[in-house]
Image: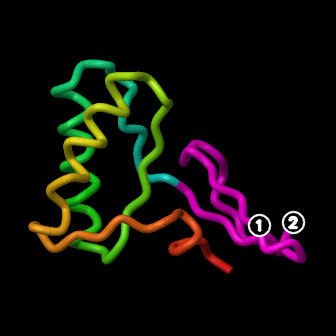
Amino acid sequence: LKARGLAFVDDGAAARRGGPIPRASAERGIDDDLSGEAIEGQLRALEAGAGARGAALGVGFAYPVTISQVRNWAGGLNARGVQLAPASAIARR
């Protein structure tokens, strides 16, 4: 995988061990509760974590409510000084 430039992204439940493959682990799932308010709260918590630590990774499923909430949240990130980046940007190499 590493030779092909790929990384492993997990949902944070896997053991965090080092290894030869770049890896990124999510700190939270954003849609364990499928209410729009709960997802928005998880996204705000990720944003706060990114502000405190410089980066944060969350995972979610492609549920319509998840996509809608992420779209709404992401629309205002630039105004709040936050930038979306791919998981590879924080993968430990």
Q: At 71% from the left edge and 71% from the top edge, which residue is drawn?
A: 22
Front-lying residue, 34 or 20:
34
Q: Secondary structure at mark 1?
A: loop
Q: Which residue is tagged 1?
A: 6
Where does the image place residue 83, in percent across and percent down from the top left? 30, 70
What colour-coding does the image apply?
rainbow
Q: Residue furthest left?
A: 79
Q: Which amino acid, mark 2?
A: Leu
Front-lying residue, 39 or 71:
71
For label 2, count other residues whose C-alpha is less than 10 Å away and answer few (under 14), some (14-19) or many (20+). Answer: few
In the image, is residue 10 above or below residue 30? below
Would you say the residues marked 1 and 2 are in contact, meaning their CB atoms lie under 8 Å apart?
yes
Q: Which residue is tagged 2?
A: 1
Q: Which residues are magenta?
A: 1-25
Q: Is residue 57 left or right of residue 54?
A: right
Front-lying residue, 62 or 34:
62
Q: At 87% from the left edge and 72% from the top edge, which residue is drawn?
A: 4
Front-lying residue, 75 or 9:
75
Q: Secondary structure at mark 2?
A: loop
Q: Is residue 34 left or right of residue 44?
A: right
Image quarter in which the C terminus is found:
bottom right
Query: Mark 1 or 2 closer to N-term?
Result: 2
